Amino acid sequence: AQTVTQSQPEMSVQEAETVTLSCTYDTSENNYYLFWYKQPPSRQMILVIRQEAYKQQNATENRFSVNFQKAAKSFSLKISDSQLGDTAMYFCASGGGADGLTFGKGTHLIIQP
Amino acid sequence: NAGVTQTPKFQVLKTGQSMTLQCAQDMNHNSMYWYRQDPGMGLRLIYYSASEGTTDKGEVPNGYNVSRLNKREFSLRLESAAPSQTSVYFCASSRDIQETQYFGPGTRLLVL
């Protein structure tokens, strides 16, 4: 069984600032994967970044990077130079078992102009 | 590439009515999934199909049935809709069970 916890229901920052979204997880799997998905008002679920647990190097995708702390079971998302288009719900998810992903409840990120 | 498509986009049902939500993917993925999204709850897995010919229950399967019609299509059926099934339903697919999942646009269902 897996659990994913996002402790920040909502965050608000100014455009161009850096923001970090928190996520902790628990899993009994040895090989697992962690994801951040973005859900803008259009409701479409968009993959932001993926991290394989066996890789020590933190994943990065342009302005998005993660801080993966395996021992602490922590997987935070950092957004640099935030833009108005980053306003969305962000979901942390874990996978690796024999079924689908387990999602956190989400963080609503608001980028203020 | 269409990716993952879902029909309908929006549906209103009366309690007790039945309906089928359709999902299709054109990425030649082996695995497909159905989730529901409720306010403040994130996404929860209803059913999944690891490969063509197999289906398994997820976290919240009660009140639903699924059919993996072929490799491309995975449908979700509500036999007797209840107000508690008012939700947004997402279909997703992945190359294999542990790979990245790609989502459809969602179906908003309102049960009165």
Image (cartoon, rainbow, N blue to C red):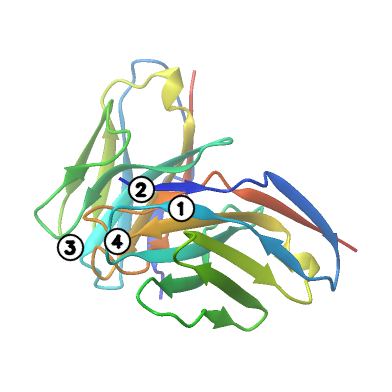
Q: Nearer the viewer, residue B30 or B78?
A: B30
Q: Nearer the viewer, residue A110 or B85?
A: A110
Tag 1: amino acid: Tyr
Q: Quadrant of residue A64?
A: bottom right
Q: Residue at x 66, y 52 (%)?
A: A41
- Mark 4 vs 2, N-terminal side: 2
Instruction: Identify the residue under disc 1.
Output: A25
Q: Is residue A28 above or below residue A96?
A: above
Q: Are marks 3 and 2 on the same chain?
A: no
Residue A54 screen position, x and y as percent: 35, 75
Discs 2, 1 touching: Cβ within 8 Å: yes
At label 4, counting other C-alpha atoms closer than 10 Å, the crowd grade (few under 14, some 14-19, many 20 or more) is many
Tag 3: amino acid: Lys
- Please state if B87 lies on the left or on the right of B46 as rendered: right
Q: Nearer the viewer, mark 3 or mark 2?
A: 2
Q: Is residue A84 above or below residue A88?
A: below
Tag 4: amino acid: Gly
Instruction: Identify the residue under disc 4.
Output: A96
Q: Chain of mark 4?
A: A
- Please state if A33 lies on the left or on the right of A90 as rendered: left
Q: Which mark is residue A2?
A: 2
